[in-house]
Image (cartoon, rainbow, N blue to C red):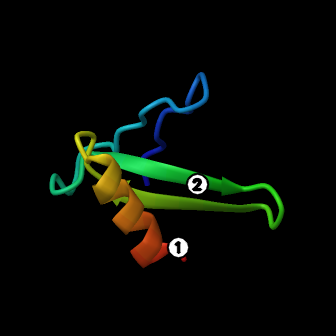
Amino acid sequence: MIKIQEPSRPWEIVLPPGGDRSYDAFLVIVDRFSNILIFLPCHKDDTAMDTALLIWNRVV
């Protein structure tokens, strides 16, 4: 398992280390109430609509 870089500031883009090239970024969602961390593979050039659909389909 390859460790990814730790973000140095909020909302930093963290890219996956090699491997599957169909996705080139992760959307990280932190739920501080339940202490759950969710990593969703995505594309760095996704639009707001793409991101909203990703959250709706994978989280809600």
Image position of 51 (left or right of 59): left
Which residue is farthest front?
49
Q: Quadrant of residue 56?
A: bottom left
Q: Which mark is residue 59?
A: 1
Element at label 1: loop
Give the residue type at disc 1. Val
Query: Where does the image place residue 5, in percent across and percent down from the top left?
Result: 49, 33
- Contact between marks 2 and 1 (CB within 8 A): the answer is yes
Q: Nearer the viewer, residue 44 or 20?
A: 44
Local crowd size for mark 2, using a 10 Å CA cut-off: few (<14), some (14–19), many (≥20) = few
The front one of 31 and 3 is: 31
Amino acid residing under circle 2:
Ile
**Who comes first in sequence, dot 2 or dot 1?**
2
Q: Residue furthest right?
A: 33
Number of marks in the rendered image: 2
Q: Position of residue 57 (x, y in %)?
A: 40, 77
For label 1, the crowd category at 10 Å Cα-Cα, with few meaning under 14, some 14 to 19 and many 20 or more, is few
Residue that protrudes farthest toward the left in the picture: 22
- Going by the picture, which residue comes out furthest to the top? 8
Could you say where residue 20 lies in the image, as x and y percent from the top left?
20, 57
Quarter that holds the C terminus? bottom right
Residue matched to label 2: 29
| Residue at figure coordinates x 37%, y 55% from the top left | 51
Name the quadrant containing residue 17: top left
